[in-house]
Image (tube, rainbow, N blue to C red):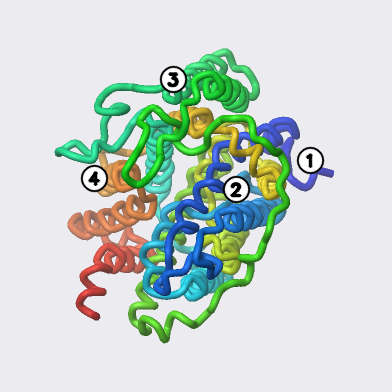
Amino acid sequence: MLDSYFKISERGSTVAQEVRGGVVTFFTMAYIVALNPLIIGLAKDADGKYIGGGDAPNLALVAAATALIAGVMSILMGAVANFPLALATGLGLNTFVAVGIASQMTWADAMGLVVLEGIIITILVLTGFRVAVFKAVPTQLKIAISVGIGLFIALIGLVDAGFVRRTGQGPVPVTLGDGGELVGWPVMVFALGLFLTIGLMVKKVKGALLIGIVIATGVAVALESAFKIGPSFISPTESNPKGWGLNIPALPEEVVAVPSFDLLGQFNLFGSFSNIGLITVLLLIFTLLLADFFDTMGTMTAIGHEAGLVDKDGNVPNADRILLVDSLAAAAGGAASVSSNTSYIESASGVGEGARTGLASIVTGILFLLTTFLAPLVSIIPYEAATPALIIVGFLMMTQIKEIDWQDYGIGIPAFLTIILMPFTYNIAVGIGAGFVSHVVIRLVQGKIKDVHPLLLLVSGLFMIYFLSSPINTWVG
């Protein structure tokens, strides 16, 4: 029954591969359960209240709701779209909601805007517009999106592991480790996990990524127990450069904790309109919409290419269903007060482990649901043990670069901008937008504007509005 519904054999996979892939995807993105509360749970709204309406942060509430929505939507993605793509609260989007939106209104109003964005993007899917835009993109630009995301997630892995860090001063934005040196046991755990995983992959050991994460976590727990390393973040004015990036890999005092889902339903759909005005509200929704729209398109494309599930034109099977579930997830995240949920590029780690169907997403979703009760257990896995998988997957996705025609400037230059701007701006949508706009401009200069799909012209115009949103907002204000 499983094989027939999910087409496991048809896609060259096995149930064991799908389970392993789902587990690896979960491990590489489970950090969101701990990180999302730190982003939206510690920020105050315009009334000085924390999310949920309290005068003090309640991170457990945010963590439970974060895991719940991630679990439900990942299972829905697997069951409805049969695609190895998991969802959770979108990084970047949650920061924008916390800093750029909630600071101007109440948390309930801010989450109402997220729900509105999710409703609008769902309508765009149901009308066929979102899928039509995806199909209007030239095949080689879709490949460039996949390659750029590969470079992006490799950088995410290096930064989260502390191997690459911000300098905080001078002309160079990032550097090796702390001041040009690798310091502390955590980065050694990352190096061990990376080389162990590489060795296992070279030897073609099944479950290489999962084995690497488990062994690196075990070593991390032993080191923390022996040396009491502690976290890298101590306070806003004090840090420990030799500490762990997020989770401290120590055995928890309790394994099971009863969750509370009191945040669900705490949103006000139209409250923001009376607070900041129609024009500002529309600009905020547009920013959320565009980022969500193209982040997912890029992620879906990258996963499809890596899993070998695309057709000759670079189109992904069941794209309409994938985008529908993703759109519903945006609204669900707002309705649960955890910010817009979106597709996670970390799903590529599960694909690297062999996942090819939606069964892997269901496994990931079940693990997220269990996390609502087992949050203390999940907190054992540090960044440094999970991020080696992202480096490996980044390499695998970069191998597609050979399919791009670099001799055609109308493709090569947009592909180049797409690839470099994703990691350099830490934003998938920016890379996609730069690629689209430059492709249109170059084709115009070449006198080949008729080769550009009308929808791509429209979207490029929207991206120009997105890039110029700050001066436009200032002018309107």
Which residue is depicted at the point 49% across and 34% down? 383
**What amino acid does circle 2 point to?**
Ala
Q: Considering the numbered disc 2 on the image, is that residue within a helix, a strand or a loop?
A: loop
Q: Considering the numbered disc 4 on the image, is that residue within a helix, a strand or a loop?
A: helix
Q: Considering the numbered disc 1 on the image, is that residue within a helix, a strand or a loop?
A: helix
Which residue is depicted at the point 71% across and 35% down? 19
**What amino acid does circle 4 point to?**
Tyr
- Give residue 188's mark: 3
Q: CA distance from mark 1 to mark 2?
A: 20 Å
Going from the N terminus, do you reach mark 3 or mark 4 first? 3
Which residue is depicted at the point 23% across and 40% down? 168
Judging by the rendered image, the residue that carries numbered circle 2 is 86
Circle 4/circle 1 CB separation < 8 Å: no
Q: Nearer the viewer, residue 417 or 403?
A: 417
Going from the N terminus, do you reach mark 1 or mark 3 first? 1
Going from the N terminus, do you reach mark 4 or mark 2 first? 2
Q: CA distance from mark 2 to mark 3?
A: 29 Å
Judging by the rendered image, the residue that carries numbered circle 4 is 409
Q: Residues within 10 Å of mark 4 (few under 14, many from 20)?
A: some
**What amino acid does circle 1 point to?**
Asp
**What amino acid does circle 3 point to?**
Met
Does residue 312 lie above or below 259 as drawn?
Answer: above
The picture places residue 132, in percent across and down from the top left corner, at 49, 63
Nearest-to-viewer mark from 4 and 1: 1
The picture places residue 335, in percent across and down from the top left corner, at 59, 69
Q: CA distance from mark 4 to mark 1?
A: 44 Å
Q: Residues within 10 Å of mark 2 (few under 14, many from 20)?
A: many
Q: CA distance from mark 3 to mark 4?
A: 42 Å
Circle 1/circle 2 CB separation < 8 Å: no
